[in-house]
Amino acid sequence: MKYADLHCHNHMRAYFWSQGREPHFRRNNLDNAWTVISSNLRSQSKAGMAAAYSQCDLVKAWNGGVRLTFNSLYPIEKGFFVSPESPSDGKSMFLREVIRKVTHHRLPLRTILQMVYMRIPDRLVKKFQDLDYDYWEAIQEEVEFLDKTNGVEVSNQIYTPGFLRRAVESRSNRRRLRPLSLNATGIYRIPKNLRELETSLEKEEITMVMTIEGAHALGTDQASLPIEKFLKRVDFIKKDWPFPIFFITFAHHFNNFLCGHAHSIPDIGKWLLNQDNGKNDGFNENGWKVIRRFLSLNQDNQRDDSLGYRILIDVKHMSALARKEFYEEIVLKCYKNGDVIPVIASHCGFSGKFSLDDHIQNFDLENDSYFDVSGNFNAWNINMCQEDVRIIFKTRGLFGLSFDQRIMGIPKKEDPNASRNNIRCLWDNIKYIVKTIYEDTSVPASEKSEIWDCIMIGTDFEGLIDPVTPYPTVLEFCEFEIDLVDTINENRSHVPGENQFLAFLESPEDTLKLVRKLCYDNAEKFVKKHYFKTFR
């Protein structure tokens, strides 16, 4: 079976370690995206937070049947590594200030904490802490790293971090005992145009569609630079990069000085990090200019082909206010003019909220225990409400289903006798996304089932997430598919009333076809429809 993932970072572990151990990796020909950074198998077996093990490196993706991946470039943000100028708002401000000073990035404790938490080399931590660390330069290096083995068949090598582990572990034995995790010969291809995309999808290779996570990648944290500098960088991406970018996740965890980001850091993280600056804001003037340049629109929202190919917008991480403004100012105005811009929410959950205004009015309530009235959905505005779902459906966009426990609505402390940390939480999210459209009286009955075409997997693997326990890596996609088929069939037998939205499924075979759409077919159909006929 083939699988697709709308948001992940297939190359990230190999890239980080290649940067952190550059001389060794170059000497030993390890500096490519296929190199496996040996996982901590105990942590993987417990489905813990994915820093010590890989979730979707290219070997696991190859052996797990991933044949269409939306792989995200991400120059990691300074806010994770550099001490904030002031602690984040909250209780015990004096203690927060003490912790901020003790863990200052100029002191060794901060570096040690980052190394242990993120499992990356100290050299890399220090690079990210350096005041000269530049997002725009960093993403150029990442592009070069991925382009190096683009279209090249590679047999992977293995790198084991830690002197003691290398001394006692046998790579050949691990490869023999864990072949799905550690052994592959394969090829990924980043297509330059629709023709190459269609050809790649027919071959036995990973079709890699490139995306960017965060418009900060343009270097917009250097707010003193003129806006023309950032607009030219958008043009550079379109005209000079060796491959095209399909969509950009416009906001991320920290201020990009273009639009507001949603609250995304758990309460415990706020003792070390501060994402308050720009959080929950809307768009500023520069933000409108940059987002229109990505979309190849002029200031009147008219398509301008001289601005190059269109890079779609992913609204994950945008604040609810920024999403509301984006829909009203661009998406709906363009829709009215016949220019349908499909809205993407690449790695999200359902918030249980009705409208974006519901989110905006309750920004201050967001903490680890903030759920919707049912208690089943994470109600932070980083997740999508019914209004978002209706916009995604209206534009026939995509909703990528995150595999992050927190995003899927699993509380930090859950009753083990009523656990939803399994297919239940994923199904609950799918069900209420679908019900949003089935219960919308403005949608013709004949079109309601098309909401199923707008949902797919969007794991956020390698994004340092705590995965839903039964599915910690792409190797468990097959189990997810089986579990989802079984769950839908169970619900299908109770169609009258609550599950009327499953009434069109007349047999178990229909369920199999439906789940195949969520696992692969929707992604292939969407990317074929919207990929670039020409590149440059």
Image (cartoon, helix red, strand yellow):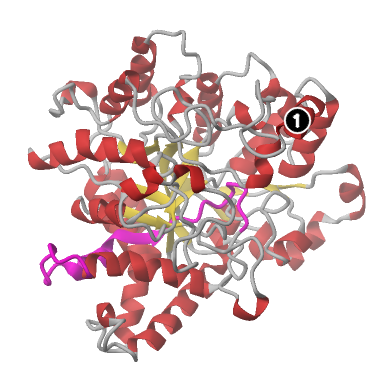
Q: Is residue 462 magenta?
A: yes
The furthest residue to the bottom: 493
Q: Which amino acid is tagged 1?
A: Phe
So how many labels did they put on this image?
1
Q: Position of residue 407 (x, y in %)?
A: 51, 56
Magenta span: chief secondary structure: loop
Q: Which residue is mark 1?
A: 94
Q: Is residue 417 magenta?
A: no
Q: Position of residue 521 (x, y in %)?
A: 32, 64
Between 178 and 39, the residue placed more toward the observer is 39
The furthest residue to the left: 337
Q: Secondary structure at mark 1?
A: helix
Against 488, residue 429 (above or below) is above
Between 340 and 102, the residue placed more toward the observer is 102
Q: Is residue 366 visible?
A: yes
- Quadrant of the rendering where the N terminus is positioned: bottom left
What residue is rendered at 84% in x and 31% in y? 109
Which region of the structure is painted magenta? 439-466
